[in-house]
Structures are given as structure tokens and as C-alpha cells.
Amino acid sequence: MFGYDIGISGGVTGMDGFLIKFFPNVYRRKLKAKEDNYCKYDDQYLQLFTSSLYLAALISSFPASKVCTKYGRKPTILSASVFFLLGSGLSAGAHQIWMLILGRISLGFGVGFGNEAVPLFLSEIAPVEYRGAVNILFQLLITIGILIANLVNYGTSKVHPWGWRLSLGLAAIPATGLFIGSLIIPETPTSLVERNHEEKGRKTLKKIRGVENVDPEFEQIKVACEIARRVKYPYRNLMKISSMPPLIIGIVLQVFQQFTGINAIMFYAPILFQTVGFKNDASLLSAIITGLVNVFCTLVSIYAVDKVGRRLLLLQACVQMFVSQTAIGGILLANLKSTNSLPKGQAWVVVVLVCVYVSSFAWSWGPLGWLIPSETFPLETRTAGFAFAVSSNMLFTFVIAQSFLSMMCHMRAGIFFFFAGWIVIMGIFVLFLLPETKGVAIDEMKERVWKKHPIWKKFMGDDADDRAKKTIEMS
Ligand code: BGC
């Protein structure tokens, strides 16, 4: 659903039927516009259609974290599916702009609830040695959603004047899948124990591990829950010095994920490819090519993340993304002026470079931006901390969605150097500040990761939580 929403908007906002119905001014301007390559799609309202969803997601991730703690991961996912169903119905059937907006808000609530609960769900049910791979299924499904959306848009763009209704309405299919799925899945053992259903928690753990003896893991979960239960105000607890390391890492990784510039490509790839000179169909097709690269390279990450670790993937990708972004910027700077288009050969080189860029994102910052924040918080601040990570992602997704077309209009080819600059900062951050979390049990991060890191250990005093933990362990 998240992926489908990301992929569908760019195509829909390019469809004439949609523009005539809801944005007639934009349509008139589009017909009359004296076309400037970098500026022809710069329109605040159009960008707002794409970005409003992320604003709703940003706001809803905080109530979602409360539902997640109080009622569990499963009902949170179920609520997400209901929001998605409502949102797809409203936007596909919209006759007036308020229905469209209400639909976007409802979809945004779905993303807020879903993105809060699903990565946590996956990290909590996964066995430690495969946690990275299992969690990355979330990202894999995002990329598949984006690809399907691109394919759908390719087909519906030929259905005048209501192809956009199909694009928006077909979201109900994965939403129904999520609805049914959320009734079938078990609740995570951690959430069950946290909410005092100890026996059920043990039974679920046995079931998902497929073995009878789950005592060591179950004891770990119980200790984590015992500590968590003593924390009455998770948000206040999150502001303690000792909570800063995972909080800073969680927020920064998500912000950086967006400053790779990925959504400039994901939302606006067809527009970008038109900018360099492809016709409508060819540019949609190129968007499908990048979508395919995105899916297949996420598989690389599933394979590699628990073997080579998180840091290596992120650092390698920084180099690859930096090189491809600067190369794209260089080509556009040298050859794409306001009104010409690139020679065919060069336009294809740009498509290849975009694929090189997307591939490295797909095995690194894409999945790891979600994985690392979902595995580094202790249970007592996990849902609250993760809500900050999710909302930071949404905030900057919103910022990029709202501003990319305007930025391209004003900065022109410089936009690619802008993102390349951020990538250098991200690489330095990972090099010095990101600890490796591969192979560490989710409830042992504090002892084995934060307290061992040369910089972050300074934040981890022997506080009340540690004393509580020792008491429980001794008893
Ligand atoms: C990001 C999205 C992005 C997608 C691309 C996700 O991890 O959060 O913003 O569009 O990856 O595959």
C-alpha cells in the first residue's frame, strides 16, 4: 500500500482527465505554457496532491504508536487496512476536491499506522539471525508496490477520461489483502507479554519458532517487558540522555534516507525522463525499468544484510549514489538547456545512471532506513521512538514531494549536486556514528551495542533502568 501510493501519484497528476476535473487551471496552463524543460510542471497545488498524504501520515504516526503499545501490532495493522480501504474508495470515487483530499488524508493515516506497526512486527517476530532479511520484506513489498503502480499508470493513462479513477481505486486490492492478512497473522510474543498475556506469548513464540524449547528467548522478552511496564511515560523516557543514541540514529537515518533524493525519482521519474527529452510513453516505460531495478536490488539486501552487516551496505551505496548523482548532474549541466532536449544516446545514459543510483539505494538506505530504527530501541521506548523515526521520514518525504519540481525549476541541474552533497555528509555520519547491529538480539542492543560504542557509550550512564534490569535478572 505504501509503495503503491508512492508510485501512483506521479502518473495520476500527469493525466489530463484528472487535471481537467480537479485542477483546470493547471491544465489550461499546461496547454498554453511556453515550455521550459526544468519548469513545466512546477505547481504548488499539484505537488500538494502528492505530498498531503505524507503530512497525514506524519501526524498519525504518534496516535499509531499509542495503539501499537496499548492494543498490539496486529490491531494497528488492521486499522491501517481500514484507512486504506476508505481512502482508496474516497479518492477513486471523488467528484469534488474535498473528497479527493479526504481520501488522501485517509490513505495518509493508513501509511502512518502501517509504517509504525509493520517494521516493528517484522523485527519482533524474526529470529535474530535473519532479522535483517525478514524486516527487509517490508521494503521489498514497497518496491513491488511502486512497480505495480507504474505498470497500472502505464495502462490507465490510455483510458480517457477516467483512467485516474482506476489508478486510485485499484489500491483497494492490496488494501483488502492487508485487511485479510491482518486477521490471520499472530500478535508478536513481545506485544502479548507486554500486555500481560504471558501464556499466549509463550505459545505464539513456540509456534513461530517451530520448537518446544523457547525458554532463553522468552526470558529475554520477559525481562524487556518487565522494564517496559515500569515506564509509565514512554515519551518522557525517550527524552532521557540514555535514550538519545537510538533516537538520534533513528531520526537521522530516516531524514538522510529522504535526502538521498530517492523520491525525486520515485514520484517524478516520468516527469524527469520527459525533461531529458523522452516522449510520454517512453518516459513511463523508463520509470518501469527503474522500478524493476528497485525490486531486484532489494533482494540483494535481503541476502547480504545479515552477512556483511548494515554499515558496509550503507557506505558502499554512498559511493555509488554520489558517483551516479554527480554524473547525471554533469550531463544535464553541460547539455540540457531550457528548451532543447538531450540527444537520444545521452538520454539513455541518464536512464542507466538513474538505474545505477536506484540499485544502490535499494540494497542500502531504502531497507536499512526502516530496519535499523526498528531494531535499536529498547522495548520501553520502542513504539514511541519508532514513531519519531516514521514521522521524520514522512516529514521529509512531504518536503521533497512538495518542493522537488520547484527545486528543479530553480536549481536546474544543480539539484543533483545538492543531493550528492548530502550523500557525502551521510557517509561521514555512518563511518563515525553508526554502530553495527548485525546478529545482536533486539532486546540486547543497549548492553552489546550502545554501551560498547566509543561515542554513544558516553550517553549510557548506569541509570535506573539498568539497576531495575539487574534486580530482575538476579531474582
Ligand atoms: C522510502 C520511500 C521510497 C522507497 C523507494 C522507502 O524505503 O521510505 O520514501 O520511495 O523506499 O523504494
Image: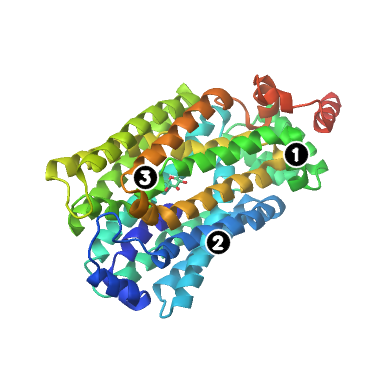
The residue nearer to you, when weighing 417 against 255, is 417
Local packing at callout 2 (Cα closer than 10 Å; few below 14, some 14-19, many 20+) is many
The disc, 1 or 3, on the residue closer to the chain's N-terminal end is: 1
Answer with left or right where residue 357 lies relative to residue 154: right
The disc, 1 or 2, on the residue closer to the chain's N-terminal end is: 2
The disc, 2 or 3, on the residue closer to the chain's N-terminal end is: 2
Q: Position of residue 394 (x, y in %)?
A: 53, 52
Answer with left or right where residue 365 lies relative to residue 320: right
Q: CA distance from mark 1 to mark 2?
A: 31 Å
Answer with left or right where residue 336 lies relative to residue 81: left
Q: Is residue 358 above or below residue 440?
A: below
Q: In this rendering, which labeled residue sits more in front, label 1 or label 3? A: 3
Under circle 2, the secondary element is helix
Residue marked by disc 3: 415
Residue marked by disc 2: 56
Q: Position of residue 133 (x, y in %)?
A: 47, 34
The three-letter amino acid code for the residue at tag 1 is Cys
Q: Position of residue 142 (x, y in %)?
A: 42, 48
Q: In this rendering, which labeled residue sits more in front, label 1 or label 2? A: 2
Q: Is residue 129 above or below residue 47?
A: above
Query: At 65% across and 52% down in the image, what residue appears?
Result: 65
